Structure formats: C-alpha cells, structure tokens
Amino acid sequence: MATPASIPAPATNGGQWHDPRAYAQAQQRTQTQQLNQQKYDLEHNLDMGPERLGLDFLLDGHQRINKISNGASEPAPSNFQQMFRDHESPMHNRSSSVTSSNYNGGELMGHSGHSGHSAPIRNSPPTCPLDSLLLDFLTERQQQAADGVATPRLVGPAYPSVSSLLNPSRGIQSHPLSKVFTDILGTFPDLSTLPEKVAVLYIMFLIMRWQISPTQENYDRLPDWMAPRPSQLFTPHPAWIDHLPFPKMRDRLVREYNPRDYLFDNFFIPFTATLSVNWPYEPTDCLLSSPENDDLMINPVFERHLRRLDNWSLGPVFAKSFPGLADTFRVKIDGDRRA
C-alpha cells in the first residue's frame, strides 16, 4: 500500500515545512532513545525510591505490576505479554450483543445461523487501498483455516508486536497479523505519537484476530465499544470503518456512507492528525522493556487506559471537516485537561 498523497507535513519551530517521513523518523529515534534508557534502568535495577522503574506512580497502593524476572532458571517467554496474562485481565465477560441471524455475510463468510460472537461483519467491495489490504489479509487467513491450518498459527500471539513500531526492520520477525498493521500504520505519518500508534495497533489487531478466529474468547477480548454494531453485521460498508474506535461514528458511517462525503483519502488526514488517547504520562511509559532482550510490551496500565472510550478524542479540525459526525465522538479543544 503506497503512502497516501497530499499529507501535510508538520511544521518546525522555525515555521519551515519538511518531509513528514523525516519527522516521523525523528520521533522514532527519540522514542527509541527513551526506551533504551528504560531498558538500562530495568537491567541495573536503579533505586528510584517510591517511583522505582517509573511505574509505581501510575498505580494506587493496591495495584502492582509483576516484577520482570531475569533469573537464569526461567526461560524468556516468546511473547512477553504472557507474563501479564493473569494480571487484572481486561477481558470482559459480557454477553454477545447480537443474536443468531440468518443473512448472507458477503464474499468473506457466507455462513448463516451464527451466534452473537461469531456473526461476521458484512463488508462491501474495496473502496480504497486500505480496504483491499484488510479484506485480502482476512480472506487469505480464512482460506488457510479452511485448508486446515491450526488456529494458533493463523492468529499468533495474543498481543501485537510493538517493537517494529519503533524499529520497522524488526517487522520481518513479527507474526503476519502484527506485521500487516505495523506496515499500515507506517503509511500514516500524521499518526506519529507513540501512545496513539500503540492504541490503534492494539485495536486493529484485536478486531482482525477476532475476524480470523471468531471465538467467544477473542470476542470477549474486544473492548465493549469495539464489538461490531448491528449495522456492521447487516449493512455492507467499507472495511476501514470497522477499525474506528467510536461506535456511534461507525453506526453513522455505515448507514450514510458515500464517497462524496466520506472518501477515505479525505477522512484519514484530519482523523490521524488529531486522534488522541490522552495518555497523561511520558509517551514511552505506554510500553515496558525486557531486561532479557530487546522485546517491548504494552504497559498493562496503558492497556486499561486505552480500553476506556472516554480517553479517546479527536480535535476541532476533524469536527469542522465532518460536521455530520460531530456528535459521535469526544472533541478535545485547547485547555481540555481531562485524561
């Protein structure tokens, strides 16, 4: 997928415009340096008093993040997130939001009589390169499942690989389910801040993981507000809409989509440029670094933060660009200090 054209580059302090890729690369270098320092602190067990490891100040007195062990007798897990699987899991044991239905799920999944957690989203033919990427990847994985490929191999680890967000060259080591989304995010230079990158990667990863393997477990891992709306299950619509974090916005776009008002090429610029998860701490605190190797993982505190829809917002530029969606999301204006 080619980098979309006509993306405005950020301005420097001197007011000069420069290449958005250079800006994004500078952001990645800064974030990498901060994470390297965090890794050093973890390795050397720096005594920082009550804020040891830079995490305790995020938690109340009853919460604790498991200490990362570097004992020689314990093999390093292949996926670092396994260490936190039992730590206040954010999984919701909610009931399925949609009952069994008897409809044509489109070309991707034409089965009928699905239970709520397995009812497929109904997409239209591709309307943009992103649609093509999403639908082609899903179709490929579903075909592999039909050919008997084991589910663990199809969906991979329970969490996305975040290391390649900072070091794209490591993407080749990632599971394809992670790599497809880190590659997609790399085409959006305006989505340049680390917390937003990690949050969008997390959401898109969980949606696709559930679509590939629509089990109750994978459905329950979706935040409540990312569970497909009935409109997404019954009305054909572009696949990119399914990955937006705002449920009211998805509903309206599914019902009212037309390329004149909501062409993706016009939509993604103000969306990615103003999207915020309003993380109130240092950007690199959204990740943790392993003292054993170069693996990175999502900070469980940040995971809980991003799973609250109230923490997501868009800016006035987006609201002005799409007045028909103005009441479907939180608008963050200057001076809004809410987390």
Image (cartoon, rainbow, N blue to C red):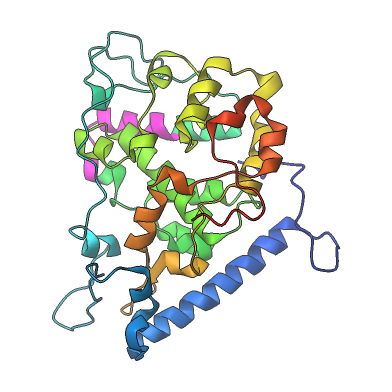
Residue at the spot x=40%, y=60% of the render?
173
Residue at the spot x=52%, y=77% of the render?
34
Q: In x, y percent, where is residue 138? A: 40, 32
Magenta stretch in the rendered image: 137-152
* Magenta: main secondary structure: helix
Lateral position of residue 154 relative to residue 41, left or right? left
Q: In x, y percent, where is residue 185? A: 55, 49
Residue 297 position by quadrant: bottom left
Lateral position of residue 34 relative to residue 152, left or right? right
Q: In x, y percent, where is residue 244? A: 50, 36
Residue at the spot x=53%, y=24% of the render?
238
Q: Quadrant of the N terminus?
A: top right
Q: In x, y percent, where is residue 28? A: 58, 67
Query: Is residue 291 positioned above or below 137 on the image?
Result: below
Query: Is residue 225 positioned above or below 82 on the image?
Result: above
Count the labels in the image: 0
Residue 232 within the magenta-colored segment of the rendering:
no
Lateral position of residue 117 relative to residue 339, left or right? left
Question: In this view of the protein, which residue sits in the foreground, 211 or 136?
Answer: 211
Residue 122 position by quadrant: top left
- Residue 176 in sight from this viewpoint: no
Query: Is residue 26 positioned above or below 123 on the image?
Result: below
Question: In this view of the protein, which residue sits in the foreground, 99 or 334?
Answer: 334
Query: Is residue 9 positioned above or below 251 on the image?
Result: below
Residue 142 position by quadrant: top left
- Residue 209 in sight from this viewpoint: yes
